[in-house]
Amino acid sequence: MENFKPLKQIKASDAVAQQLRAAIFDGTYRAGDKLPSERELIESFQVSRTVVREAIKGLEASGLVQIKQGATGGAFVKLLTFERLSGVCRDLFFVGRLSFKEICEARLIVEPQIARMAALNCDEMYSKALSDADLHESDTLEYPETVVLRQKVHCLLADMCGNRFLAAISKSLLQLVGEINEVLDTDTDLIHPIGLHKEIVDAVIANDQDKAEQAMRNHLTEFLGILQKIEQDFRENERTLI
Amino acid sequence: MENFKPLKQIKASDAVAQQLRAAIFDGTYRAGDKLPSERELIESFQVSRTVVREAIKGLEASGLVQIKQGATGGAFVKLLTFERLSGVCRDLFFVGRLSFKEICEARLIVEPQIARMAALNCDEMYSKALSDADLHESDTLEYPETVVLRQKVHCLLADMCGNRFLAAISKSLLQLVGEINEVLDTDTDLIHPIGLHKEIVDAVIANDQDKAEQAMRNHLTEFLGILQKIEQDFRENERTLI
DNA sequence: TAAAGGTCATATGTCATACGTTTAATATAT
DNA sequence: ATATATTAAACGTATGACATATGACCTTTA
């Protein structure tokens, strides 16, 4: 009969976090700005330091702020980037809620479209950057750098497509594949030799959308196919070892 | 000359969080399991309660655990779901790092492929669920429920596609569009009348991949087109109000 | 005078202790 | 047997003290 609603006792630290979030979202604090110091927040919210600290810790963990220590320290609002999305993908994968196959499938759906959009948007500056990246793909550097080089074309295309969400997805998956590759200990030069991107780059520079899309599809089909095979073997070996 | 390495002073709370993360990832604690209580963690790590609590708070904020109070309380490992991805998308959007147009574009790329994959995988059980959802779309319920009903077909297709990553993306965007819709205060019945999914559902049930893909593309093109128009108007009005 | 080192102020990081709150299980009273 | 009260375990909050990091400024010295 009575129509009372159960009042949800929200934790003080969450309430503080929520208000700070809101302040960040509505632009009160922009990227790079410093949130008030702990002492000030204590004053404003009239809570203990524990509460303030836990609230900020939460914001840090969810990637909204970065905490710096020292005289000029404090909680600084971070520029939200795809890094966070990337982190989520990594977590999902490592918890086993995401298979390598699924990642490959997703790339195979998203990246050809990205290549298409990139072909549409390609201007002179991008053309130069692309051929540059394609050219220096073979530069010999220390280990982690070579991978970056090899991924450069994909990253550029992602940036060129004009859609930050798709770009973020693409880069996240790219990075994840890179990390997995590292675990598998594959020889990059062997499975992803130089020059594989040439066809794609040419098509994009020529503003040929259809060709760009198809070239990317071909490239991924081949490359990811090989990788999946390797990954499968790896799993089987791992199983026999256990 | 000297070959000293800068020692990175990692915060105790971060170190604890990192170890707990690792334990979750390597399967020591699975979804639903309870992490040791604060007291126990204090003992294990030999740190103060503050440190332990901040570490756990971080895990909670990044969606890895859920904290419950009370006699049987503690930090329980959460089943990682698309919720987290969804949260990231929401944040990015509300901070303005993601435009409505980009979201629509992404849906337009991903969902037709999902429909195609769903058509491939559709068996009797899914068929029944689909036609069921399509049928009850018009059930009149309280506000938030109607939206869920209207989204049901999209969700089902996402689940059917067999790729959890794509499903997660699709659901995240779907949910986000729903929330934006709420802000825009649109009349669901007006812009998304009953029966719009019929063609898609029929094609999927008939295992007709091409048709399913095309039907989804048509549906989204139309629906999202209308929404984008509304959203644009909203922005302009908002600007004049300020 | 410029570079190295010292001092200080400030902000975050950690510790220890006490008490409050929530929740489930158990005991008790009616 | 039902309703109520008690208890215990776990998290939540408050507070004060001390540790550590870091930039700014001052001081010494070559």
Image (tube, coloured by chain):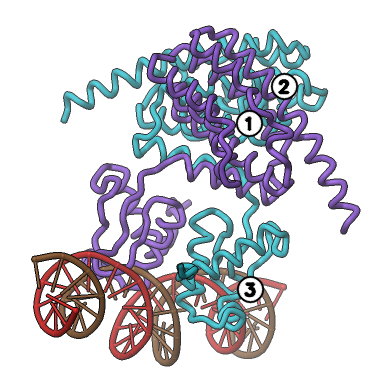
Chain colours: A purple, B cyan, C brown, D red
| Residue at the image point whose x is 60% and y is 61% from the top | B21
Chain to which mark 2 belongs: B
Classify mark 2: helix, strand or loop. helix
What residue type is disc 2 on? Met
Where is residue B141 shown, x and y percent of the image?
Answer: 53, 31
Q: Looking at the rendering, which quadrant does residue B125 occupy?
A: top right
What residue type is disc 1 on? Leu
Q: Earlier in the sequence, mark 1 or mark 3?
A: 3
Q: Are marks 3 and 2 in contact (CB under 8 Å)?
A: no
Classify mark 3: helix, strand or loop. loop
Residue under pointer 1: B166
Q: Residues within 10 Å of mark 2 (few under 14, many from 20)?
A: many
Along the horizontal axis of the image, is A112 left or right of A60? right
Classify mark 1: helix, strand or loop. helix
| Residue at the image point whose x is 27% and y is 45% from the top | A30
Where is residue A115 shown, x and y percent of the image?
Answer: 54, 18
Name the residue nearer the viewer: B240 or B110.
B110
| Residue at the image point whose x is 47% and y is 18% from the top | B189
Q: Earlier in the sequence, mark 1 or mark 2?
A: 2
Residue A125 visible within the image: yes
Q: Residues within 10 Å of mark 1 (few under 14, many from 20)?
A: many
A169, above or below B33, in the image? above
Residue under pointer 2: B117
In this view, the residue farthest toward the right is A240
Residue B61 marker: none
Residue under pointer 3: B36
